[in-house]
Image (cartoon, rainbow, N blue to C red):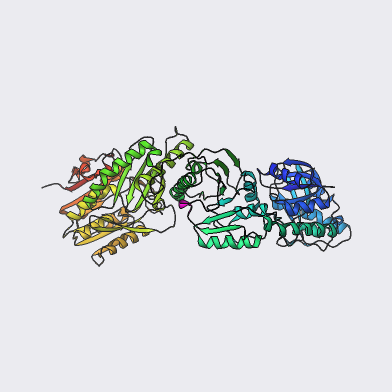
Amino acid sequence: MNQYLAITSRGLENLLAEELEKLGASNVKAVSAGVRFRADEKTLYTCCLWSRTASRFILVLSEFTVRDDMDLYLGASAINWPQYFSENKRIAVDFNGINREIRNSQYGALKVKDAIVDRFVKADLARPSIDREQPDLRIHMRLSKDKGLLGIDMVGSGLHQRGYRTEAGAAPLRETNAAALVMKSGWTFDKPLMDPMCGSGTLLIEAAMMAAQIAPGLKRKRWGFESLKSFNREIWMEVHADVTFKSKKGPAKCQTRFFGFDNDRRVLETAKANARRAGVAELIQFDLHDAAELKRPEGFEEGHIICNPPYGERLGTTPGLIALYTQLGVRLKSEFKGSVASIYSGSDELLSCLCMRAESSYKLRNGALDCVMKTYQITARGEVTASQDGAVAAADVAPEFSNRLRKNIKKLSKWAKQQGIACYRLYDSDLPDYNAAIDRYNDHIVIQEYAPPKSISEDKARRRLLDMVRATIAVTGVNANNVVLKTREKKKGTSQYEKLGEAKRFMTVQEYGVTLEVNLYDYLDTGLFLDHRYTRKMLGEKAKGKDFLNLFAYTGTATVHAAVGGAKSTTTVDMSKTYLAWAERNMKLNGKLGRQHVFNQADCLKWLSTAKGQYDLIFIDPPTFSNSKRMLDTFDVQRDHIKLMTGLKRLLRQDGEIVFSNNKRNFKMDTEALEALGLKAQNITSRSIPMDFERNQHIHNCWIITHKEG
């Protein structure tokens, strides 16, 4: 009998060891990411065809100490390679691991390859050719610290490639991992099995193949061991014929029912095609259905649910996923009492949204992601309060926050309607434990989480955020897919408007009869500063018949209000080409394009130093601080505001007004220096802060600056 190493994913070692013992292997011992065992040829062939959790089987040829590349070369060349395969075979070397001397796996593979071909040359044989794409044999080298293991891959391409899956959904689960999850879920063949988010059907297909006794390796066309001199074709044909007979006979005997649902018709067609290729199409009922509206199918009595819901890595997907897991928990508890559910996810927080207590958990990585499968016994007693549409009652999640948000909505929705605005703040860190701002934009909600203090653990902060998102969805009734989650951190001045993505999902909103374009997804800010709403309205009321200047214009919303208010001309200046184009689109939405409306892309400070126009009304809302590479110098609003006013005074007509705003907390106007310039300032901050921002009187400060009389 030969010594073999069965390779598998970390976490599957014991499962694979049990599987190999049942298949007849001896001296079975689990090791890191694998199982060592001994087997004769017949047992090896049987294991190759029947193992559901092994990725590869390696014939171990040698184990030796590898301190450096010379040890590696000598250890590999000590093997009599011509004894195992002929010189006309194409080979590839797979090298796994590094140590202090061999730090590059490609270099390690090269040294092993050199040793192999040199051994053939010394035997007066031709050099075997190297073929990384379609080799006849793969040589396997595993290095851990100074311990090396060298052998021949009996399989070829990985055993997870069953041959039934030609394409998959957005996040495919490897077949070997899917089989392991089914085996560890506790499901038995006498129970129906359902996957409410089946995707390309891998979990159900693997389970159906188990129930129908179909060997997972049966469809494989080529095996590595067929290229060995020791290959026993007679034994192989005997084993293969026996496995083929059992696999063909199994589906007709299988009485287990399988149900697969998904809301993507295209992916379902893929799942059906995969099931046909796997030979289990007659066993699985696939239907188009949304998991959020899941109902117990006919014939599914106290069965087993298994699924791998999405658990995206992008923050923007979180609200929709929170709602999905929450709703899945509701449906499971309302429709499947007495059943068992095994849910596999990369997010413990999302699993907590199911609001069910797990009976067991099983950790298994999915690629580079740490994931866990939790199994729940769904009891017959009612465990969750549900509204008529099935949503979890808001009072069940973060009740203090839910009550505050509900109270704010009741107060602000009437006010917003009276004001004629569709965008306003619903919540602004009202409660210290729920540190976020929540804004409504038509039928969308934007939740901006403020970075928690260092005294709050990351897990606790994440749990609070999840509760806050769930409660917001429940209280507002907004579609979870229309909820956008962002994280706002204190910056040190490098970027005022951080870019988050490239979704380019713009929408229009109304504000006092003006139409404006916002983007809730691509930037930390949306293109509309809600706290400046009253200031924009005031500019519109003051602008009739006047020449208007907007510096640091951002998306030009103030310019639009001035133009709609009847400004004679407008000049909009910003350093960003992107935002200036946005400003032009805003003007076009309101029919305000023409030669009288000028847009200048420029460093505002540089532009101000050379500008020659005269203006009746000037709006300037500079950043608190900027060190943009495109500016000649850094800018600090506290330090440089008098320098700004010096330039603006030259452009301001005698009876004109400057509306100056900024967001620096505790900003102090240098009134003495201002008066020395011949200007005077009136603080109108209290009048410029709207009702939805009244909790934060320091959100901005606002001034009207004019020439001194006389």
Residue 110 shows up from this direction: no
Please name whichever residue, 408 or 78, is drawn nearer the observer in this view of the structure.
408
Can you tell which quarter of the image residue 279 is in? bottom right
Q: Residue furthest right?
A: 124
Magenta residue span: 290-303
Picture layout, residue 57 above or below residue 586: above
Point 62% across, 60% down: residue: 282
Q: Main secondary structure of the magenta part?
A: loop
Residue 291 in the magenta stretch? The answer is: yes
Q: Position of residue 437 (x, y in %)?
A: 35, 43
Point 23% across, 65% down: residue: 596
Q: Position of residue 2 (x, y in %)?
A: 83, 48
Please name whichever residue, 14 or 305, is drawn nearer the observer in this view of the structure.
305
In the picture, measured across the screen, residue 38 lies left or right of residue 255, that is right
Q: Residue furthest top?
A: 455
Q: Position of residue 331 (x, y in %)?
A: 47, 47
In the picture, measured across the screen, residue 393 lies left or right of residue 297, that is left
In the picture, measured across the screen, residue 466 lies left or right of residue 588, that is right
